[in-house]
Image (spheres, rainbow, N blue to C red):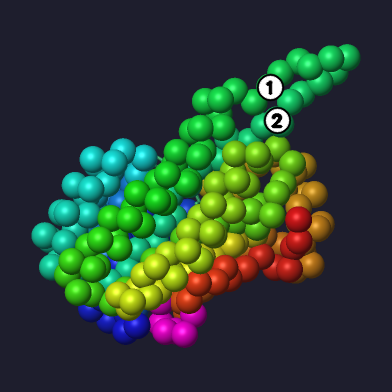
Amino acid sequence: MELKNSVIAITGAGQGLGQSMAISLAQAGSHLALIDLNSQGLEETLQACTDFDTNIKLYCADVTDEQDVEATFERIVDDFGQLNGLVNNAGILRDGLLVKSKDGVISKMPLEQFSSVINVNLTGTFLCGREAAAKMIETGCAGVILNISSVARAGNIGQTNYAASKAGVATFATTWSRELAKYNIRCVAIAPGVIKTPMAAEMRPEAIERLEAMIPCHRMGETSEIANTVKFIFENDYVNGRVIEVDGGIRM
Ligand code: NAP
């Protein structure tokens, strides 16, 4: 896909990986629909893209809210007249053990802690992917839907909710690639390892140290390394239905 003058939506674009992807795609000449709950973050991303000659619009929306998502994609197509790409990037962490015990069970992961992560990471990706596909089909646009999974999709202690959601979004990409190929829509997932973002900063320092020791590259990834992979996937028309692992070689 030619990035110049394409229209790409990015969820969770107000900080971290989403912001880095926005800068890289704007630099490549894509017009951007930036979606996030955090309007201040969206403004910051817009400011970071002012050097590039592209059209960028901000949409404050909650990816878990079906009506909000439907209205947002409606507005995107009204504003730009087309949609060629979506990066399903919005995601949250609410880590905790399934069950904690010390001389008997002392706590269990609350259903709300489980559901909040499933709602944003899995349901949000489903809703945005569904609306993006519908709009691409309605407007006759060839396109790419890219889901941000995680190395945790293989399973990780303390991440019942997150790991399940990230396994789910990887499977969405495989399923959608098969369903949507006839409309010239490719679907791919990226499974990043540990990347230096505000989300990673929520991890305990000792957990980061332990993780870095386990990474064959001996460091966390840079946001630009994920943004480069996003660009590569958009530009390479033969990448489809796969999960691209960008994790410094870590295996969980
Ligand atoms: P981040 O810095 O926390 O940014 C996530 C953005 O998503 C925030 O701006 C957040 O807004 C927004 N968001 C949260 N819930 C939302 C909702 N319901 N609707 C719309 N926007 C919402 O995260 P990140 O580290 O850049 O990670 C981005 C993606 O990469 C996530 O899917 C994450 O799981 C995945 N990932 C990250 C890493 C890593 O090491 N960082 C590794 C593997 C995978 P608020 O600030 O208002 O909540």
Asked whether the viewer can see residue 54, the reply is: no
Q: Quadrant of the N terminus?
A: bottom left
At horizontal 32% and vertical 84% (from top left) the residue drawn is 2
Expressed as whole percent of the image width and height from the top left, the position of residue 73 reads 22, 54
* Amino acid marked by disc 2: Leu
For numbered disc 1, what is the local secondary structure?
strand
At horizontal 53% and vertical 59% (from top left) the residue drawn is 171
- Residue bearing mark 1: 108
* Amino acid marked by disc 1: Lys
Query: Is 120 on the left-hand or right-hand side of 86?
Result: right
Q: Which of 197 and 122 is in front in this view?
A: 122
Q: Tell me whether circle 2 and circle 1 mark residues in contact (CB < 8 Å).
A: yes
Query: Is 196 on the left-hand or right-hand side of 90?
Result: right
Give the prevailing secondary structure in the magenta stretch: loop
Q: Quadrant of the C terminus?
A: bottom right
Compared with 219, 184 (above or below) is below
User: How far apart in space, not on screen, are marks 2 and 1 (Cα)?
Assistant: 6 Å
Instruction: Find residue 110 and report its image quarter.
Output: top right
Instruction: Find residue 247 and report its image quarter.
Output: bottom right
Expressed as whole percent of the image width and height from the top left, the position of residue 85 reads 32, 68
Expressed as whole percent of the image width and height from the top left, the position of residue 78 reads 11, 60
Expressed as whole percent of the image width and height from the top left, the position of residue 57 reads 21, 58
**Part of the protein shown in magenta:** 234-239
User: In the image, is residue 94 part of the stretch drawn in magenta?
Assistant: no
Using a 10 Å C-alpha cutoff, classify the residue at mark 1 as few (fewer than 14 neighbours), some (14 to 19) or many (20 or more).
Answer: few
Q: Nearer the viewer, residue 62 or 164?
A: 164
- Say whether disc 2 or disc 1 marks the residue closer to the N-terminus: 2
Query: Is 138 on the left-hand or right-hand side of 223?
Result: left
- Residue bearing mark 2: 98
